Amino acid sequence: MTKHDPLSLLIELQRRARDETARAAARSRREAATAGSTLRMLQDYGEQHRSRAPAVDAPAVSVDALKIRDAFGRRLAQAIGEQDTVTRRLEDALAAEERRLLDRQRRLDALEMLEQRRRAIARQRSARQEQRQTDEHA
């Protein structure tokens, strides 16, 4: 088969598509990991914030300080919720990219298998033709 065989061209195009999909999946994987790391950091910070709450028997804290602390806690909880949403969205996008990558790989594998079968058939035909020529000379 020549390099310009339609099947060879199709295989090359499918390889390129698979490689591009693999790059997209890798980007999605990095983005999801970064978002997950940020979420864990915010959650840890939230736990630290809650653990440093003034104790009941602690010296009196001003009402203004309590309001500031409470407002900060609400903003931190909101940030955690938003980051959780972002993380889930990126994980869903990663799962979709990985499914696309598997689909591209399956298509490429099928085309390569078809090419191997065609080569095997061509070898068999060539061997039969050589055998016929050998038989005719004998």
Image: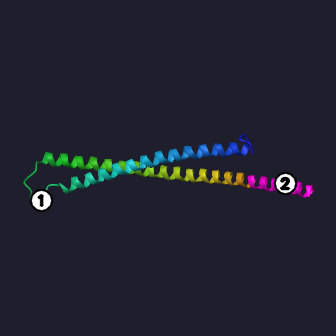
The numbered dot on residue 56 is 1
**Is the stretch drawn in magenta largely helix, strand or loop?**
helix
Image point 62% across, 54% down: which residue? 106
Mark 1 and mark 2 in contact? Answer it, CB < 8 Å.
Answer: no
Q: Amino acid at mark 1?
A: Val
Image point 8% across, 52% down: which residue? 60
Residue 130 is a magenta residue: yes
Rendering coords of residue 76 (x, y %):
28, 48
Q: Quarter of the image for the C terminus: give it.
A: bottom right
> Crowding near pointer 2: few (<14 within 10 Å), some, many (20+)?
few
> What coloring was used for the rendering?
rainbow
- Residue toward you, 34 or 73: 34
Image point 22% across, 54% down: which residue? 48
- Asked which secondary structure carries label 2, the reply is helix
| Side (left or right) of 122 relative to 106 | right
Residue carrying label 2 = 130
Image quarter for residue 128? bottom right
Which residues fall within the magenta stretch? 118-138
